[in-house]
Amino acid sequence: MRKGIVIAGAALALITSCNNMGNPFLRESSLPFGAPEFDKIRTEHYLPAFEAGIAEGKAEIDAIVANQEEPTFENTIEAMEYAGQTLNKVAGIFYNLMEAHTNDEMQAIAEKVSPMLTEFSMYTSLNAPLFERVKAVYAKKDELGLDQDQMKLLEDTYRGFVRGGANLSDEDKAEFSKLSEELSLASLQFSKNVLDATNAYTLHITDSADLAGLPEYVKTMGAETAGEKGLEGWAFTLQYPSFGPFMKYSENRELRRQMWTAYNSRAIGGEFDNSEIVKKIVDLRIKKSQMLGYETFADYALEVRMAKDRKTATDFINGLLEASLPFAKRDVAEVQAYAKDNGFAEKLMPWDFSFWSERLQKEKYSLNEELLKPYFRLENCIDAVFGLATRLYGITFHELKDMPVYHEEVKVYEVKDADGSHLALLYADFFPRSSKRGGAWMTEFRGQSIRDGVEYRPFINIVMNFTKPTADTPALITHSELTTFLHEFGHALHGILAQGRYPSLTGTGVSRDFVELPSQIMENWAYEPEYLNTFAKHYQTGEAIPMELIDKIVAAKNFQAGYAQVRQLHFGYLDMTWHTQTQVQSESTIGFEHKTLAPYSVMPLVEGCGFSTSFSHIFTGGYSAGYYSYKWAEVLEADAFSLFKEKGIFNTEVSGAFRKEILEKGGMEDESVIYRNFRGHDPQPEALMEKLGLTK
């Protein structure tokens, strides 16, 4: 409870009652650093904790409004920033586990809690007396002598109220609240449908002849998956560690077609259909944005990002698309020609591309993932990724084997600074399971902040879906999975190294098109011989990876770079097209997608297949009207990493500046200024095309 904020009697009674029931969310943790008590958290604790947290949060807002003193930065803006700590605590755990380790009961709680959270959000953002206090402070902002981070918090708070509907009429506020609640529920249903559709499909193989081309580790994984499902033979799922290798190596074209079609028709029709939910989400976003005076949702979303406006973002995407498309067409033509030379007379289809591309890469560079995996034992990669942070930033990682976790496979590490002081707890969750969505991501159970003179260091979580160890083989990851690991670890460093007072401005509390800089820059080390030769050793012989293989990794780095770039830009282009509409089109979701992408598609579009219905990044994950951010940040990181290349990839002067100016700063200043403070100039777009070899 923040000093000076009085909790209303009813809220206090509710909290006390829950406390007596031993709800771990509603008392101080007994663990070191105040870590989450995952060993004590039960599903039945979530709902009463949410209810108590909302009651406490409302009481704190009421106390700010009821304060008879003149509005000041401290008693209004700062008090709001620190309000709702109980709610933040429970939500920080619940919604992270909804992605990483969910169950039906949690899904039901999420549906029940969603309107409660929306109502609480509106209780704050549409609170007229509260906004009057904020406006009073904002009106005299230049007279207050605020520090830089305080001024940023004040400006963000004021703008957040305006963007949240505070200037609407009472009638429009009610409608805005209704739309917000509908949007929250629609997003929840979208996410649930994607997970259910992903888990609903299994390719069951009983004839060993249908395994032709699959490496032993893929066959073993398939046999173990079948065993887990009570099936004979082999089973392959739409989880990427299963789906990806199958598409690359299976010689059975018909089975590849079945797998590809299942993956790319997830949540299209049937029991878990997202087709109309996509349109509903887009429609609700349009309506909310237009109520606030914006023509489109993209105009609303981009206002608070580095790009600032729709034209800048769309020009960025279109410019890269036009420049990259000839290279992508060349890449596809090369694969088609190679397939034809090797007896494949059919037209290249999407379920053929990965298979033939992998073979072409192997022939050109004598390189494939099967050849490399033995050198990337997961345990060695963990040490190497952590060791890179030690070398760059002086921080160290110490496993805490007795710290409670939310799943038995999760590992916990204490992160210490060079002087031995505590920085953070890092939770690492590496393997797929049916309770976890696909992909890889970083989240936090608690961000860094300072309240009443006490610093709270963060609890960071990185989540992957790497291939599990088998009965006779340790966990071996592909080189691309190592790159993914480095990417998510870069996000983790952004949280771990955060320094600041205000939780909304620390760590990854930056604009969406800046947040990928710390992650994407880390990927570069996966291609640096000076780094790879420090840890890549054969898991059976202990032999260091031959320099010949490292040279091939580096040489193959930009293999099919044009195709990969256009594929990524497709996602951004489709996202922006969905969100620059002024009203939802009447055509089908997949019809709209195909019409949008047809001019820029270098592979055939398949009837009944698409990715909008499973495009979680933009429909539930915070990247709506912002998927271009990945490429935007690639420009930033290509320009930034060029300084490491110039000075040395382990240069501590450069890494020290990157830590101080980028990783520690969070969102305490405009991101364009933050970047210039590090690099000395604005990002150079040419750096990306040069890095990818797309200049000839």
Image (cartoon, helix red, strand yellow):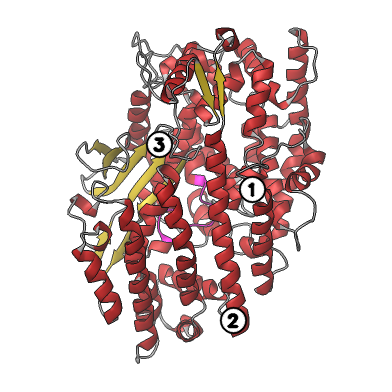
Q: Position of residue 311 (x, y in %)?
A: 73, 58
* Residue 39 visible in the snapshot: yes
- Kindly identify which numbered label has been placed on residue 90: none
For badge 1, the amino acid type reads Asn
Secondary structure of residue under mark 1: loop
* Cβ–Cβ under 8 Å for marks 2 and 1: no
Q: Position of residue 24 (x, y in %)?
A: 24, 57
Q: Position of residue 642 (x, y in %)?
A: 54, 37
> Which quadrant of the figure contains the N terminus?
bottom left
The residues tagged by marks 3 and 1 sit, at their Cα atoms, a distance apart of 48 Å
Image vertical order of residue 309 relative to residue 16, above or below: above
In the rendered image, which residue does mark 1 sit on? 274
> Which quadrant of the figure contains the C terminus?
top right
Image vertical order of residue 439 relative to residue 164, above or below: above
Q: 628 or 63, which lies in front? A: 63
* Cβ–Cβ under 8 Å for marks 3 and 1: no
Mark 3 vs mark 2: give the one in front: 2
In the rendered image, which residue does mark 3 sit on? 651
Q: Residue at x 35, y 13 (%)?
A: 472
Q: Residue at x 32, y 63 (%)?
A: 49
Of the image marks 2 and 1, the number of the one nearer the N terminus: 2
Residue range in magenta is: 505-517
- Kindly identify which numbered label has been placed on residue 167: 2
Residue 508 located within the stretch drawn in magenta: yes
* Residue 453 visible in the snapshot: no
Image vertical order of residue 453 relative to residue 514, above or below: below
The residues tagged by marks 3 and 2 sit, at their Cα atoms, a distance apart of 50 Å
Q: Residue at x 35, y 10 (%)?
A: 540
Q: Position of residue 189 (x, y in %)?
A: 55, 52
